[in-house]
Image (cartoon, grey):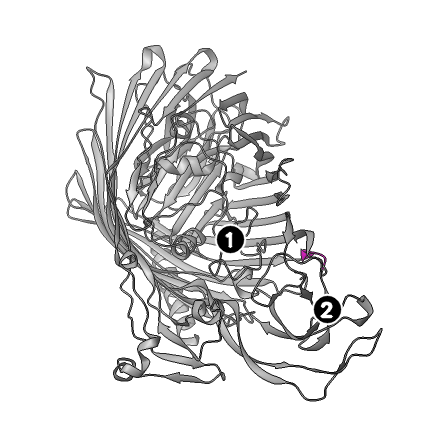
């Protein structure tokens, strides 16, 4: 580490010397006036960004801006204002310059309107702007992301949590959860953390290890995208390739969301479809002279899972207030502060006709989000800008699950420590009610500087950024609570106890990063290289050490403009995702076995004795899981045709999962020495016998491996003037393999058998799945500017969609005997006849491949704009009402892959 720090310091000294040469030349000023392109009226509060240095300016009431201390050479400026089409300008500075810039109001009256994601200059990332978001009539961030090439479009659905999987197709649940967990969602510069979410359940052994809770929860997974309203989003950038070194705690990619901040007239939007009603209101206004700008966005959604079932509902209510203001002379300091209040409710009301189970389920989240961004335009030769981000997210989470438990008369224990206890008999029928209350708190802080931002007229430029991050994730909730005498449904001697979250340690992360963006000319061609290094400390115990591991993560992206039309791209990078509290601290697991059971008619004569075994499943040995990503491709731009092709390969090692452990317990069976009248039996000092018992419990592991590779592509045509139509063709081929790299005892034979097995096999699992998918999307945009009318259609085809289990070895690698001893076998021994009973039975179904036929999906969307940019939109999904029904040869059942024909409408008013 000391050597690394010395190298960094030497590099900074060298850059200081280089910057002195640049500082000797006179620094230039860029000034300008920004007006409405149609009315020529000045536009105040326009944000002007110097790309690369990230310096920011803002226009005054007269539309005037000034950016001081710029180097000679190439310069790219970006102009943005809510309600207006963003604009970019490429300049070559030789002297002070005065610009006159016109911005066009966002409207269907514009000649050029695109509803497709736009490719960025370096790396693999796509930007979705407000026009596209508005036209797809998105309700949440999850709806917006359907515009990404390779993602599958589907109809409205708020019945379940919305997750995003980037560059990965369906294999198994562990892989899907790891991809969603490894996809960072960054809201206005502050990551939304799900690390402290503990809304989990103790899995009944009849279910698979790691099964989801009966209530709605994304603990141990990615953020629920339903909770981010689409109306307040100004733009979304999705990084699917190698991310910048400034982004951490991720593996699959990042979704960068920018919400609106600025002055705009009140907007009222109503959306309605058979499953939902939504109302959104937003406006922005100036607070008098030099007091800044206030922006408010309010949103309410009420949705049903099924129009025929009003008992299952989802409700979202939220408001966000944003205050932005420039400070100091020449507006050299900018600050934006956002306060968000949100509440969501997943509610399954009790059916009055459900007398058998009496189930009632809900999950309620109430969140407070506070974030502040501060940016200082330093304008120094060695420091261009200095910025800081601060974020706080506090959520009140309450989940509830109620059901009627009916079972034989059974013993129950509430012992918290291991030992033998006199227990009691529980009720044969009772109403079990479990409440899980979490209070996750996430704190984020980042400080970043842009150093040595130099450029010249020959096309050379260089920018070095460096920064550090701090993340805190804790949960002080009451935890999982219920009456010990009326526990949730369990079986196979599994005990259950209430548990508080207050004693769980918080997770703290500290990170440092450096990144250099280098641009030069090779002949007439431009070469860009972005190279960065990130150092993550998980559960930081010092400035350079972490209790759960240290991660050194190199990343590099390259772009080379070979011809006017072709830009070659390549990237390589390593990223890491920290373990969540739900994986680190699952808590104690209990096994309660009966030693003596005498149920007399006289309650005074009854006696039940139980032994409680306690297993601490907390796993502080978990390390962050890592992904290594490589990609190669090209972007194309010629005569109005734009597109790209990118091939990629990604390997994820050490992803989190849940395995079922098997333990052998030697249980004393006690006997009664006498049965006194009116008193419990008197037990003998010596047990009648000691018998083995196979117990099971779930633990968190770090041994899932995921391999993704594929090709994604997109082609956008220029507008065909005779048809006023543009075509967009994109898609992806993806192959994903996900499997378990560990070894596991055959828990089904051990736990579920009616007799105690003499020995239970251990297999080198390698268990997993392989999925292949090839899908394309053909969109058309028919735009009539004079009529302010836009019609778009989608033809989506899933040409190939296969899934199969990976080959499993029949031979065991060892076995556990009923006396608790473990014996390992060589491959030669495992093949011997004496171990034939330990071989794994592989059915034809397990080895079969599910090969679904092609699936077609058609949708149509139209938007008509009226005066003052008010508008009416309408859409129809699955126009042909094709459910995509086919026979799954693995499960031998029919599957419907498309939703029903679906439609909806949106009406917006701009006051």
Q: Earlier in the sequence, mark 1 or mark 2?
A: 1
In this view of the protein, which residue sits in the foreground, 316 or 900? 900
Residue 137 location (% of width, % of height)? 43, 27
Residue corresponding to mark 1: 212
Dividing the picture into quadrants, the one containing residue 888 is top left
Number of on-image labels: 2
Residue 94 seen in render: no
Q: Residue at x 29, y 66 (%)?
A: 808
In this view of the protein, which residue sits in the foreground, 840 or 477? 840
Disc 2 packing (10 Å; few <14; some 14–19; many ≥20): some
Disc 1 packing (10 Å; few <14; some 14–19; many ≥20): some
**Mark linked to residue 578:** none
Q: Residue at x 44, y 12 (%)?
A: 866
SS class, disc 2: loop
Q: Residue furthest bottom?
A: 686
Residue 533 location (% of width, % of height)? 38, 62
Residue 880 seen in render: yes
Magenta segment: 477-483
Q: Reply above or below: 490 against 268.
A: below
Which quadrant is home to the N terminus? bottom left
In the image, taking residue 468 as reference, residue 601 lies left or right, namely right
Task: Answer whether residue 480 is magenta in the image.
Answer: yes
Residue 351 location (% of width, % of height)? 62, 36
Q: Residue at x 43, y 51 (%)?
A: 180
**Distance of mark 1 from mark 2, alpha carbons?**
37 Å
In the image, taking residue 442 as reference, residue 481 lies left or right, namely right
SS class, disc 1: loop
Residue 467 location (% of width, % of height)? 47, 57
Residue corresponding to mark 2: 599
């Amino acid at each position: 580490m000391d050597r690394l720090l010395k190298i960094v310091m030497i590099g900074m000294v060298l850059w200081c010397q280089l910057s002195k040469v640049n500082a000797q030349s006179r620094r230039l000023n860029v000034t300008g006036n920004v007006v409405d392109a149609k009315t020529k009226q000045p536009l105040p509060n326009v944000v002007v960004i110097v790309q690369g240095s990230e310096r920011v300016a803002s226009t005054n009431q007269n539309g005037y801006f000034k950016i001081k201390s710029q180097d000679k050479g190439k310069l790219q400026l970006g102009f943005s204002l809510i309600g207006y089409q963003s604009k970019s300008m490429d300049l070559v500075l030789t002297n002070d310059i005065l610009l006159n810039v016109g911005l066009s109001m966002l409207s269907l009256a514009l000649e050029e309107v695109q509803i497709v994601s736009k490719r960025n200059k370096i790396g693999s990332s796509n930007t979705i702007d407000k026009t596209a978001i508005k036209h797809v009539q998105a309700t949440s961030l999850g709806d917006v992301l359907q515009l990404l090439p390779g993602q599958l479009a589907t109809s409205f659905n708020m019945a379940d949590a919305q997750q995003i999987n980037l560059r990965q197709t369906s294999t198994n649940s562990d892989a899907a959860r790891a991809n969603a967990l490894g996809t960072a969602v960054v809201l206005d510069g502050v990551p939304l953390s799900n690390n402290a979410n503990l809304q989990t359940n103790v899995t009944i052994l009849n279910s698979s290890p790691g099964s989801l809770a009966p209530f709605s929860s994304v603990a141990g997974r990615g953020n629920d995208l339903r909770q981010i309203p689409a109306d307040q989003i100004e733009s979304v950038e999705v990084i699917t390739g190698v991310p910048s070194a400034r982004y951490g705690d991720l593996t699959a990619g990042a979704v960068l969301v920018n919400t609106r901040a600025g002055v705009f007239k009140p907007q009222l939007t109503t959306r309605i479809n058979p499953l939902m009603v939504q109302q959104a209101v937003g406006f922005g206004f100036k607070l008098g002279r030099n007091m800044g700008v206030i922006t408010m966005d309010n949103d309410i959604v009420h949705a049903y899972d099924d129009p025929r079932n009003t008992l299952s509902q989802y409700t979202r209510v939220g408001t966000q207030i944003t205050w932005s203001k420039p400070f100091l002379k020449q507006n050299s300091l900018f600050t934006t502060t956002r306060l968000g209040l949100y509440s969501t409710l997943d509610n399954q009301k009790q059916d009055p006709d459900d007398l058998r189970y009496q189930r009632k389920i809900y999950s309620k989240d109430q969140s407070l989000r506070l974030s502040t961004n501060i940016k200082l335009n330093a304008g120094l030769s060695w420091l261009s800008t200095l910025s800081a981000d601060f974020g706080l997210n506090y959520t009140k989470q309450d989940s509830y699950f109620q059901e009627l438990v009916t079972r034989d008369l059974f013993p129950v224990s509430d012992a918290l420590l291991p030992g033998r206890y006199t227990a009691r008999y529980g009720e044969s029928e009772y109403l079990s009610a479990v409440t899980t209350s979490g209070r996750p708190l996430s704190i984020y802080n980042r400080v970043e500087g842009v150093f040595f931002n130099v450029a010249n007229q020959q096309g050379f430029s260089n920018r070095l950024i460096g920064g550090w991050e701090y993340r805190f994730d804790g949960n002080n909730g009451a935890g999982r609570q219920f009456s010990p005498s009326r526990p949730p449904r369990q079986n196979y001697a599994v005990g259950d106890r209430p548990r508080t979250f207050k004693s769980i340690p918080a997770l703290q992360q500290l990170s440092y990063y450096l990144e250099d963006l280098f641009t030069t000319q090779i002949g007439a061609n431009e070469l860009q290289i972005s190279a960065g290094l990130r150092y993550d400390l998980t559960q930081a115990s010092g400035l350079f050490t972490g209790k759960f591991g240290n991660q050194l993560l190199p990343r590099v992206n390259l772009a080379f403009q070979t011809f006017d039309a072709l830009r070659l791209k390549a990237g390589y990078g390593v990223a890491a995702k920290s373990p969540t509290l739900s994986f680190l601290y699952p808590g104690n697991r209990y096994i309660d076995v009966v030693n003596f059971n005498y149920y007399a008619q006289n309650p005074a004569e009854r006696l039940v004795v139980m032994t409680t075994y306690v297993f601490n499943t907390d796993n502080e040995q978990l390390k962050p899981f890592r992904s290594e990503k490589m990609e190669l491709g090209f972007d194309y731009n010629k005569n109005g045709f734009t597109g790209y092709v990118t091939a990629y390969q990604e390997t994820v090692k050490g992803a989190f999962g849940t395995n079922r452990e098997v333990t052998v317990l030697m249980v004393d069976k006690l006997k009664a020495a006498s049965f006194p009248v009116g008193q419990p039996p008197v037990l003998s000092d010596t047990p009648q016998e000691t018998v083995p018992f196979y117990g099971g419990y779930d633990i968190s592991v770090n041994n899932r491996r995921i391999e993704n590779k594929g090709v994604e592509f997109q082609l956008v045509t220029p507008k065909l003037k005779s048809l006023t139509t543009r075509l967009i063709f994109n898609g992806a081929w993806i192959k994903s393999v996900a499997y378990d790299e560990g070894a596991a005892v055959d828990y089904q034979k051990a736990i579920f058998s009616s007799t105690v097995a003499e020995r239970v096999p251990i297999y080198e699992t390698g268990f997993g799945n392989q999925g292949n998918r090839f899908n394309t999307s053909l969109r058309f945009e028919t735009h009539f500017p004079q009529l302010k009318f836009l019609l778009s259609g989608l033809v989506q085809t899933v040409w190939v969609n296969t899934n199969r289990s990976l080959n499993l070895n029949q031979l065991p690698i060892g076995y556990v005997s009923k006396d608790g001893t473990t014996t390992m076998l060589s491959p030669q021994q495992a093949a011997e006849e004496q171990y034939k009973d330990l071989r794994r039975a592989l059915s034809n179904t397990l080895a079969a491949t599910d090969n679904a036929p092609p699936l077609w999906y058609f949708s149509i969307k139209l938007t008509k704009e009226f005066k003052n940019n008010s508008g009416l939109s309408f859409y129809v999904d699955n126009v042909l009402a094709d459910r995509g029904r086919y026979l799954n040869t693995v499960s031998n059942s029919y599957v419907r892959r498309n939703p029903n024909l679906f439609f909806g409408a949106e009406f917006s008013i701009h006051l």
